[in-house]
Amino acid sequence: PFSTTVPHLQNDSWGKQYSHALFKAMSHMLCIGYGQQAPEGMTDVWLTMLSMIVGATCYAMFIGHATALIQSLDSSRRQYQEKYKQVEQYMSFHKLPGDTRQRIHEYYEHRYQGKMFDEENILGELSEPLKEEIINFNCRNLVANMPLFANADPNFVTAMLTKLRFEVFQPGDFIIREGTVGKKMYFIQHGVVSILTKGNKETKLSDGSYFGEICLLTRGRRTASVRADTYCRLYSLAVDNFNEVLEEYPMMRRAFETVAMDRLDRIGEEEGPPGLSTATSAATP
């Protein structure tokens, strides 16, 4: 018994004896040493080595589980950090200039805000009602600020929102360039953009506006450019999805066409006979 190796414990209570024995065992296993007293016989030596091996194994398992637990508490941030390390290595490999690296860093900070999710995979695993509920909740500010959605059929709004793709642009980025074929239209969730026409006339658009739908209706080229003045959080809608949704809701197509014709008329008054062009102002059906 342990009390025989420590004389002053022979007459103590079993609680004190057990506590000292536990302390000796833990000193072997947790401190990776032989503890308070060196082993005397061969039996003690081998038992001490065995306890140290078991202790080292348990310690390694504890550290591994603790690390995994800490990482799982914020896996999205860890994924973002791992992704951005790859981006940094990519920029270093291609020897990109410093200002470009800074813009890429700022883009990632504003686009992902330190967290990264596989949103398409997550939404794809959910049922349609849950997916629609999440999308409607995420786009609630866009719907609230946009008269087009506020006054429209809720089914049309849901059908439109499920087709949107979130995009971020930095100040000075050209979202649309003059002369290109229109393949997308954009809804402004937050930010300010400038519509630049040939006559050097600028028109500002902000939250709740949309632009770029005229080319989707006319299948023409842009005759104006759109530049981001601030960090812009936009939702884009591809031409195929645009036509798919409007085929189901012909009244909304007429609403888009009415606004588009009004915009074309205003462009024609400013610049002469209008061509097939992009939008130039906020939309109100």
Image: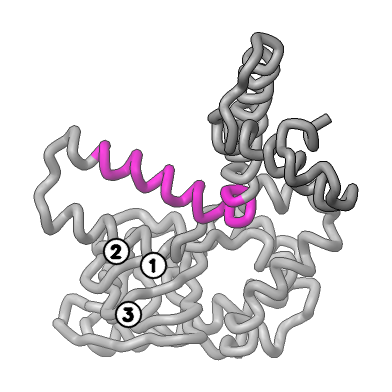
* Front in this rendered view, residue 181 or 123: 123
* Front in this rendered view, residue 80 or 226: 80
SS category of the residue bearing label 2: helix
Q: Of the residues under marks 1 and 3, which one precedes in the sequence?
A: 1
Where does label 3 land, which residue?
193
Q: Count of labels shown? A: 3
Q: Would residue 230 be seen by someone viewing this image from the given angle?
A: yes
Q: Are marks 1 and 2 in contact (CB under 8 Å)?
A: yes
- Residue 131: in magenta span: no
x then y, percent, for residue 146: 58, 86
Residue 12 left/right relative to 87: right
SS category of the residue bearing label 1: helix
Q: Is residue 129 above or below residue 59?
A: below
The three-letter code of the residue at mark 3 reads Val
Where does label 2 land, which residue?
106
Q: Quadrant of residue 241?
A: bottom right
Q: Would residue 213 be seen by someone viewing this image from the given angle?
A: no
Q: Quadrant of residue 191?
A: bottom left
Density class for disc 3 (Cα within 10 Å; few <14, some 14-19, many ≥20) is: many
Report the Cα–Cα distance between label 1 and label 2: 6 Å
Where does label 1 land, which residue?
110
The quarter of the image holding the N terminus is top right
Q: Is residue 6 above or below residue 129?
A: above
Density class for disc 2 (Cα within 10 Å; few <14, some 14-19, many ≥20) is: few
Q: Which mark is residue 77?
A: none
The quarter of the image holding the C terminus is bottom right
SS category of the residue bearing label 3: strand
x then y, percent, for residue 228: 29, 74
Residue 225 left/right relative to 266: left
Q: Is residue 269 above or below residue 47?
A: below
